[in-house]
Image: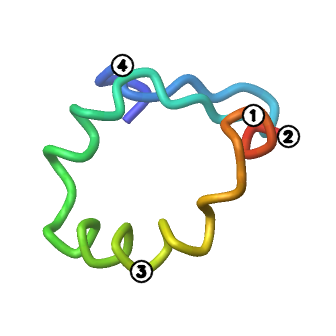
Amino acid sequence: MQKDGWIAAKRGDIQALDRPAMEARVCRCIKVVRKDYEPLLQHVTDAEAVQ
């Protein structure tokens, strides 16, 4: 994924650079997982998720 420019990884830190590209390449199960987890994570802001 790093070679494709989708993520940047450095010393235990992973940053998504091209989320739409990653999602286009993963299996269809990502939609099922997202549907199940989004309600659980509604209260988490992007800043909190990064920490």
For disc 2, the marked residue is: 51
Please give left or right for residue 14 compared with residue 8 in the image: right
Percent of width and height locating residue 51? 85, 40
Q: Is disc 3 placed on a helix, strand or loop? A: helix
Determine crowd level at label 4: few under 14, some 14-19, many 20+ residues with C-alpha closer than 10 A: few
Please give left or right for residue 37 compared with residue 25 in the image: right
Percent of width and height locating residue 14? 64, 35
Q: Is disc 4 placed on a helix, strand or loop? A: loop
Determine which quarter of the picture holds residue 11.
Answer: top right
For disc 4, the marked residue is: 5
Q: Give how far apart the Cα atoms at labels 1 and 3 are.
A: 25 Å
The numbered disc on residue 45 is none
For disc 1, the marked residue is: 13
- Say if mark 1 contacts mark 3, CB within 8 Å: no
Say which of marks 4 and 3 sits in front. 3
Residue drawn at x 35%, y 24% is 18
- Say if mark 4 contacts mark 3, CB within 8 Å: no
Percent of width and height locating residue 24? 14, 44
The three-letter amino acid code for the residue at tag 2 is Gln
Determine which quarter of the picture holds residue 50.
Answer: top right
Percent of width and height locating residue 28? 14, 69
Say which of marks 2 and 4 sits in front. 2
Q: Is disc 2 placed on a helix, strand or loop? A: loop
Say which of marks 1 and 3 sits in front. 3
The numbered disc on residue 36 is 3
Q: Give how far apart the Cα atoms at labels 2 and 3 are.
A: 22 Å
